[in-house]
Image (cartoon, helix red, strand yellow):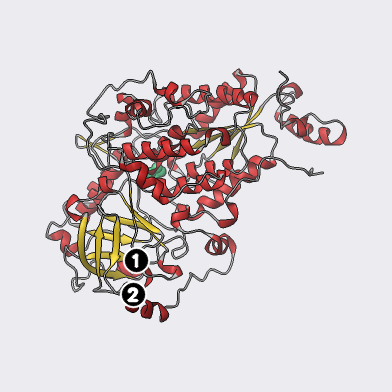
Amino acid sequence: MSEKKLRSADWFGRKGKDGFIYRAWMKNQGNPDYEFNGKPVIGICNTWSELTPCNGHLREIAERVKWGVLEAGGFPVEFPVMSLGETLMKPTAMLYRNLASMDTEESIRANPLDGVVLLCGCDKTTPSLVMGACSVNLPTLVISGGAMLTGRYRGKSIATSDAWNYFDDWKEGRITEQELRNIEGSMCRSCGHCASMGTASSMASMVESLGLSLPGNAAIPAADARRKTFAQLSGKRIVEMVREDLKLSDVLTREAFENAIMVNAAIGGSTNFVVHLLAIAGRVGVPLALEDFDRLSAQIPLIVNLEPSGKYFMEDLFYAGGLPAVMKELDKFLHQGAITVNGKTVKENYTSAENFDKDVIATVSNPFNEDSGLAVLHGNICPGGAIIKPSAASPKLMSHTGKAVVFENIEDYKARIDDVSLEVDETSILVLKNVGPKGYPGMPEVGNMSLPKKLMDKGVKDMVRISDGRMSGTAFGTVVLHVSPEAAVGGNFAVIRNGDTITLDVPNRTLMLNVNDEELEARKKNYIPTLPDIPRGYTNLYINHVLQANEGADLDFLRGCSGSEITRDSH
Ligand code: FES
């Protein structure tokens, strides 16, 4: 059987002037002709950046990928793409997810690459790279950077999810500013991303359950030597994938997406998983709707006992057997025959896995929580849908009616939330508008808004909160998110008023504003939606083209795949 012609041969395998120019400048790095001409050229797409602390170790990982590529007879080339650091970027890293995906897509397509390894870590770095790569569809494999080692403070294991409680303690004066500073270094004590089952860990689990990484990707700690071994093996494998012509679209089937949704439910994964998976599905043309998340999650109990839904950390998940042990426990639910990047099926990858700690990975028959995953809500507030994470919410608030305390935007919220004259009690429902994709813009993680100080002083720990924004995957509470359509484009959510009553009924999957249709229509007639006035640049493009959360918040013109072919030369 003759091997498929390498894509890179259209650059390096040519005669005359074109071949000369493509090859000559590669030689200024000391590469002899035979190294890159005629071998699979593997791009290592790196989100390393000192401004993305979670990805600060990815150059070391890239080196090990190169070892593996060379070992298998390929030629590795590392290249940077825009890196999205969750903690430093303003107004929110999510604003730039689609921009980074464009960078990734065009960088891959424009260059002489036969296969790609995506190096990801911090939250948005994973979906942005996967989305971009999907729109090119070369053989592609993902390596996550791995989670930080579990933090330790005063004898207690801590990670990012605990930060939310420490912030409340500081606000309430239970700990000092100096103690808060001491916690900073205790929590982030090694390389890697957040150590709870936040968005980064959910994304690392997502790529593994989709079949886009070798088994074991999600849970090996960043600082563990086995992360480097994993990188080398992945480098070796991507060269084989090029020879087998195993492309992203071969792996990313509808079954793969369903597997990822079920795994995310079992691990208590982030709410952000929804908006990112929808965006990825949109790139490969797999039909996926918000309802699929509810339907597929409904049968899956929570079996992984990690913060924020449980008490352990990613390091513990690794010692307990990692994601393969979780997937083995889900055997009867999963599409076992879905193919993965190592050429084996999902089931073949987890068959030999073992669960070493049933306190960390429980069984389906005796789970930590019958409620898992994400509930999708509908009703007159959110005709396009909204989501809530039951495992992170208070059971007593899952069916609740209360009076709305409305904040028109984030500035309004910050100005009034701790005002002692604010009319609010523990039965109230906090409503935050204009933090959606277009309205903020960028859909920031502010949905788990802090409670009013005067209620926290009374010991109130949770209230129903509703917004068109997102929340950190490390956060918790009875928080309704991703209301679609968002306030900035009009609709019923935009015209909720202070004192209106709202009914949240998670068992029946409804979220209703108890105002009659005539009144709502009258309010909407007098309401003029206004988008942020940003006259130029990427943000202007984003506001004009971003889709709503229930469609993945991708840019409308980025959905789909353009393939890898380039018909015109550069000279
Ligand atoms: Fe990067 Fe949490 S801040 S993963």
Q: In which quarter of the image is ligand 1?
A: top left
Instruction: Give how far across and how far down residue 280 sits, in percent.
Output: 51, 45
Instruction: Decide if residue 240 is on the left or right side of residue 266.
Output: right
Residue sitting nearer the eye, 488 or 302: 302
**Residue 149 placement (x, y as % from top left):** 33, 32
Q: Residue at x 18, y 71 (%)?
A: 420
Q: Is mark 2 on a helix, strand or loop?
A: helix
Residue 557 located left or right of residue 511: right
Q: Residue 517 carries which label?
A: 2
* Residue 336 seen in the figure: yes
Looking at the rendered structure, the kind of residue marked 2 is Asp
Q: Is residue 56 visible?
A: no
Q: In this view, does 92 lie above or below 255?
A: below
- Left or right, residue 390 beside residue 198: left
Q: Which of marks 2 and 1 is nearer the N terminus?
A: 1
Tell me which residue sits at (56%, 57%) in the image.
556
Q: How many marks?
A: 2
Task: Give me the disc on residue 380.
Answer: 1
| x, y percent for residue 459 | 13, 56
Q: Taking 390 as reference, is 551 left or right?
A: right
Front-most of residues 93 and 529: 529
**Could you give the CA–CA distance between mark 2 and mark 1, rounded to whole angstroms?**
9 Å
Res 331 → quadrant: top left
Q: Residues within 10 Å of mark 2 (few under 14, many from 20)?
A: few
Indicate which disc residue 92 carries: none
User: Residue shown at 25%/54% (left/top)?
Assistant: 478
In the displayed orientation, state which residue is furthest to the left: 458
Q: Residue at x 47, y 52 (%)?
A: 552
Q: Quadrant of residue 123?
A: top left
Q: Marks 1 and 2: in contact by CB < 8 Å? A: yes
Task: Locate residue 264, reporting x and y percent.
Answer: 36, 39
